[in-house]
Image: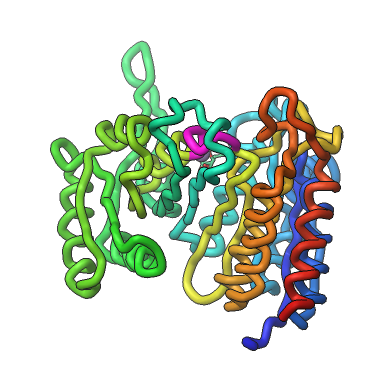
Amino acid sequence: MAETKGKVAVLAGDGIGPEVMEATLKVAEATEGSHGFRLEWKRGLVGGAAIDASGKALPEDTVELCRSSTAVLFGSVGGPKWESLPPNEQPERAALLPLRKIFGLYANLRPAVLYPELTGCSPLRPERVAGGFDVLVVRELTGGLYFGQPKETVKKGSGERAVDTMVYETHEIERVTEVAFRAAAGRKKRVTLVDKANVLESSLLWRKTVKGIAARHPGIALDFIYVDNAAMQLVRDPGRFDVLLCENLFGDILSDEAAAVAGSLGMLPSASLGLGNFGLYEPAGGSAPDIAGKGIANPIAQILSLAMMLEMSFGNRPAAESIRGAVAGAIRDGWRTADIAAPGEKCVGTREMAGEIARRVASRGAKG
Ligand code: IPM
Ligand code: MN
C-alpha cells in the first residue's frame, strides 16, 4: 500500500461547513482505521468565522497552516451575517480567491454525477437522465477574467468605465489541459473544449493550444463546443459529455449548471490543484445558511471531497474507492438526507448519513 502520511489543514468555515466537516472526519477516521494509515488533521479558521475572530477572512496563521500541509479540506464560507461587508472583504472573495492565487491552484475539477437511483432529483425529465450521468468539469482557476489586468473602474465623463480582462498565455492553457486529458484517461476518454472561438481571441489560443496537447494523448478524443451551445446541451443531454474543459468564467457558470442538472448540490465534491501534490478540496454547494445548525445537511459532498483528497494529494486510490463505494452503497440501499429524498421517503440527518458511510468503509476494510 502507498504510504499515506502528512498534515491536512481542516478549514470548516461557515454555515453548514462545521457540521458536515465533523461528520466527514468520522468517515476519515474509519478510513484511516480500515486502510492502515494516519494523517495529522489540524483545524484553522476561515471565512466569516475568521472575520469574527480576527477581522480577516483569511488570517495569516491559516495561510501558514495551509503552507505547512499537504492538502486543505475546506468546508464552505459566507452567509447573511457578512453580506453587508464591501465586496472585496466578503468571505467568498476574500478567502477563496486569495487561497487559489497564493497556492497556484490552477485546475479545478468538478464532477457532476447523477446516481441512477437519484434521477428523480434532477430537474430534467426522466428520459433525459435515465441511468444517471457522470460529467467532469475541469475549470481553469487562476486566470481569465477573474485575475486578468487591467481590472479597474475609473471616472469617465459623467459616468464611470469598468474593465475586466480576459487574458490567457499558452502555458496557463497547457497545464490545465494536461490535467483534463489525464482525467479523461481514467474515464470515457473524451475531452470537450468549451470556448467562444467565433468571437474571442483568447478562445482561438485555447483551441490551438489544446489541439497541441491532444496530439500527445492519442487515446483521447477531443472536440469543441461554443459555450452557449454547451449551456444548452447540458440541459438537453448531459450524458453526452465526459470531460468539459473550460476557461475560468465559463467553468464557473457551467459547473453550477451541471451541478443543478445532477439534482443536489449536497452530493458534489471538488478539487483545486496546482503543481505537485498540494490541493484544496471542497463541496460544490456552499454554506447553505438556511439549513445551517439543523443537523440535516447532506455530508456527502464533503465526504467525496475527502475521497478526492486521499486519491489526488495522498495517492491513496484504494481508500478513495472505499469511500466512494460506501457512498454509492448507502444511496443504493435507500439512505437519504432531506435534499435527496423523494416525497414521503424516510430521511436521516447529517450524522446518521456519515455514520452509515463510515460503518461501510470500516467493514469493507475489514474484508480486505
Ligand atoms: C465558485 C464560486 C467562486 C467563483 C466565488 C465565490 C468567488 O462561485 O467557487 O465557483 O466564482 O469562483
Ligand atoms: Mn461558482
Q: Residue furthest front?
A: 333
* Residue under the point 31% across and 45% down: 240
Residue 261 in magenta stretch: yes
Taking 282 as reference, is 293 above or below it?
above
* Residue under the point 38% across and 22% down: 155
Residue 54 visible? The answer is: no
Q: Nearer the viewer, residue 296 or 91?
A: 296
Measuring from the top left, give residue 231's x and y in whole percent.
33, 33
Left or right: 179 in relation to 230: right
Measuring from the top left, give residue 264's x and y in whole percent.
60, 36
Residue extent of the magenta highlight: 259-264
Measuring from the top left, give residue 49's x and y in whole percent.
80, 43
* Residue under the point 16% across and 36% down: 199
Left or right: 115 in relation to 335: left
Image-quadrant location for residue 43: bottom right
Measuring from the top left, give residue 27's x and y in whole percent.
78, 61
Residue 2 visible? The answer is: yes
Q: Nearer the viewer, residue 188 or 216?
A: 188
Q: Nearer the viewer, residue 205 or 230?
A: 230
Left or right: 215 in relation to 78: left
* Residue under the point 65% across and 37% down: 89
Q: Nearer the viewer, residue 160 or 359?
A: 359
Quick one: quadrant of the C terminus?
Answer: bottom right
Image-quadrant location for residue 159: top left
| Number of numbered tags placed on the structure image | 0
Quick one: quadrant of the N terminus?
Answer: bottom right
